[in-house]
Amino acid sequence: MAKKVAESTGISQNEARLYVRVMLDCIIEGLKEDGLVTLMNFGRFSCGSYDRKGDRNFKEVVTVRFKPSRIMRYEKLMDKPYPFSPSQVRQYKETAKRKAERKKKKKPPTTIIEEA
């Protein structure tokens, strides 16, 4: 992974290895703290636990209990639609800009005072 990062960015492999390690450490730290880490346009990592079933030794008639297991899950987000695509965001910004320009151009309403 570090080799691909080094090739695509033009940095040394040692620097790329450091960046990859720091990124993975941040993911692990986030999972420890919140149990959920989301990387936009990539995926979501979550951490959970489940109780494992006990095992039974029929010869000695003993049930062995196991500690709950912790697992990490990954959910791919790249193929899922986002609330706004980049073109929609661009369109929204352009529309907001045009509205702001129209407000600047508008003259304040004139009041007509009739004399009695």
Image (cartoon, rainbow, N blue to C red):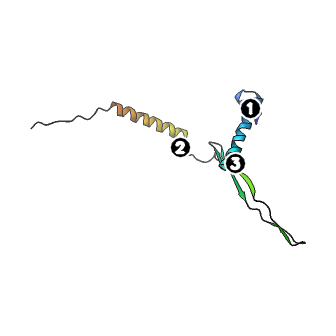
Specify few, some or many for label 3: CA neighbours under 10 Å numbering under 14, 14-19, or 20 or more: few
Above or below, 29 against 62 in this view is: above
What is the spatial separation of the Cα atoms under label 3 and label 1, in whole angstroms?
24 Å
Q: Which mark is residue 16?
A: 1
In the rendered image, the quadrant that contains the N terminus is top right
Left or right, 109 with respect to 103, comes to: left
Determine whether the residue tagged by mark 2 lies in a helix, strand or loop.
Answer: loop
Q: Is residue 58 left or right of residue 105?
A: right
Marks 1 and 2 close (CB-CB < 8 Å): no
Amino acid of disc 1: Ala
From the top left corner, tell me how far across and down residue 38 is, in percent.
64, 45
Can you name the residue that lies furthest to the right here?
59
Say the numbered circle drawn on residue 102: none
Which structural element holds mark 3?
A: helix
Seen from the viewer's position, the closer of residues 28 and 12 is 28
Label 3 or label 1, whichever comes before in sequence order: 1
Q: CA distance from mark 2 to mark 3?
A: 30 Å
Q: Mark 2 or mark 1, which is nearer the start of the sequence?
A: 1
Q: Image quarter for residue 65? A: bottom right
Q: Are marks 3 and 1 in contact (CB under 8 Å)?
A: no
The answer to whether residue 45 is above or below residue 113 is below
Q: Position of residue 28 (x, y in %)?
A: 71, 45
Image quadrant of residue 61? bottom right
Which circle, 3 or 1, is nearer the viewer? 3
**Which image quarter holds the C terminus?**
top left
For the residue pair 89 and 25, the one nearer the viewer reads as: 25
Q: Position of residue 56 (x, y in %)?
A: 84, 69
Kindly identify which residue carries mark 3: 32
- Name the residue at 39% across, 34% down: 100
In the displayed structure, 27 sits above or below 49; it is above
Return the residue at label 2.
Answer: 84
